Amino acid sequence: MDLILKAINFVLHINTFLNDIITRYGAWTYGLLFFVIFMETGFVVTPFLPGDSLIFAAATFAAHGPLNPWLLFIILSIAAVSGDTANYWIGHTIGAKAYSGEVKWIKKEYMDRTHIFFEKHGGMAIFLARFVPIIRTFAPFVAGVSEMPYGHFITWNLVGGVTWVATFTSLGYFFGNIQFVQKNFELVIIVMVLISFVPAVVEFVKARQEIKAQKVKNEL
C-alpha cells in the first residue's frame, strides 16, 4: 500500500520530480524514462507505474530545452514496444496458469477485465489498450497466454506503441507549457488519468450487464 501511495504522489507531482531528475542526472534521464515505460508495459506486477502522465510531463520539458523531443519519442517508443514484447513472452511462458489463481502475483480481477476487453476488440485490443492504464499492462500478457500469433501481435504492438508515445509526446510538447496547464498540472494529470480509464469502465459495465442478461435468459 505504501508503494502505491508513493506512486500516486509521484504521478500527481510528476513535473516537480522530473525537474529534479533532469537537474541531477541530465542525459541519464532518458535511461530512467526508458526503464519506467518498459517496466509499466513489460511486467504485470507494475501497472501502477506512470505511463501517459510520464510521457506528457517529459514532453513539456522537451518543449523548452532540457530534453530533445525527437530523441525522447524514439527512446520511449522503443521502451513501449520492447516492454509489450517482453510481457507477451512472459504470458506465453506462463500460459493458462495465469487464470487459475496458481500464480499469486497476478491479480485475477485485472486478468478478467483484460480478457473481456480482448473478446470485445480482438487483435485491435493491443492497440486500444495502449491508451487504458492497467489494461495496457495486462493486454500483451493476455495475448501471450492466449497464444495470439506473434506476427499478428507484433504488428499491433508496433502501431500501438508508436502511436501512444507520439500522442502524449505531442500533447505535452504543444500544450504542456500553456500557463493554465503549468499552474494546474496536478489537476490536468488527474483529468488525463480519469479520461483514460473511461473506456475500461464502460467495457466492464457492459460486460457485466451482458452476463446478467444471459443469466436471466438461462433461468427463463
Image: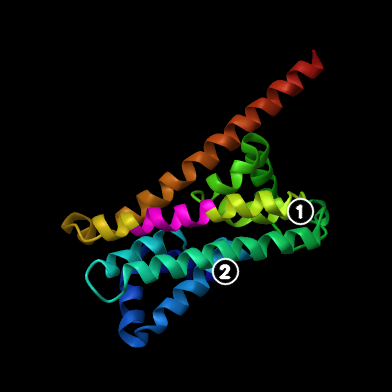
| Horizontal side, residue 80 vs residue 118: left or right | left
- 117 with respect to 180 (left or right): right
Instruction: Give the class, few, some or many, for how many residues have Cα within 10 Å of label 1's Cα (few <14, many ≥20).
Output: many
Where's the N terminus, which quadrant? bottom right
The label number, if any, that marks residue 186 in the structure image: none
Asked whether, in this view, residue 203 is left or right of residue 62, the answer is right
Which stretch appears magenta? 159-169
Q: Is residue 9 visible?
A: no
Examine the image and state in which quarter residue 158 appears.
bottom right
State the image coordinates of residue 150 (x, y, percent, origin top left): 71, 54
On residue 39, which mark appears?
2
Per the image, label 1 sits on a secondary structure element best described as: helix
- Tell me the residue at 51%/67% (across/down): 78
- Of mark 2 and mark 1, the one earlier in the sequence is 2
In space, the residues marked 2 and 1 are separated at their CA atoms by 19 Å
How are the colours assigned in the image? rainbow
Which residue is painted at 51% across and 49% down in the image?
A: 132
Q: For mark 1, what is the residue?
A: 145
The residue type indicated by label 1 comes to Val
Q: Is residue 156 magenta?
A: no
Residue with the most extreme bottom position: 24
Q: Amino acid at mark 2?
A: Met
